[in-house]
Amino acid sequence: MNIYIGNLSYNVKESDLIQVLEEYGTVNSVKLIKDRETGRSKGFAFAEMPDDAQAANTIKELNGAQYDNRTMVVKEARPRF
């Protein structure tokens, strides 16, 4: 399942997110979205978790949770059109 993680601090790194997500299950990948021109984080990321049950539990546990003084938004990612 592909997961959207939003409202992140600009200081959060992909490795930080992997550590948080691995507490809930296997993580295939994390992609922190960055501004093309500045290289600075845009404050959101996508993660891929192979087990849908673990991914659903991750969403349930982390949506609304505090991380680096920000309230995370965590939900299933919608496909791009």
Image (cartoon, grey):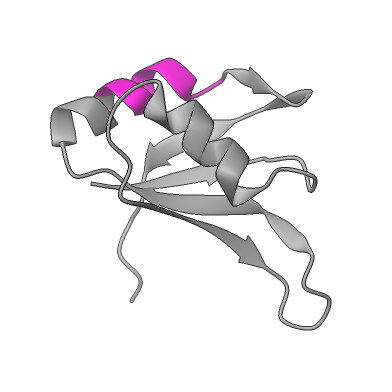
**Where does residue 15 sit, x and y in percent of width and height?**
58, 44
Q: Does residue 44 appear left or right of residue 77 in this picture?
A: right
Quick check: is 75 in the magenta stretch? Answer: no
Task: Locate residue 59: give its quadrant.
Answer: top left
Q: Residue at x 71, y 59 (%)?
A: 42
Which of 64/31 is in front?
Answer: 31
**Where does residue 43 sit, x and y in percent of width and height?**
69, 51
Magenta extent:
57-64
Which of 16/61 is in front?
Answer: 16
Q: Residue at x 79, y 45 (%)?
A: 11
Q: Does residue 36 appear left or right of residue 44 in this picture?
A: right
In this rendering, is residue 43 above or below 31?
above
**Where does residue 79 sit, x and y in percent of width and height?**
30, 64
Which of 81/43 is in front?
Answer: 43
Rendered-image quadrant of the C terminus: bottom left
Q: Residue at x 51, y 42 (%)?
A: 5
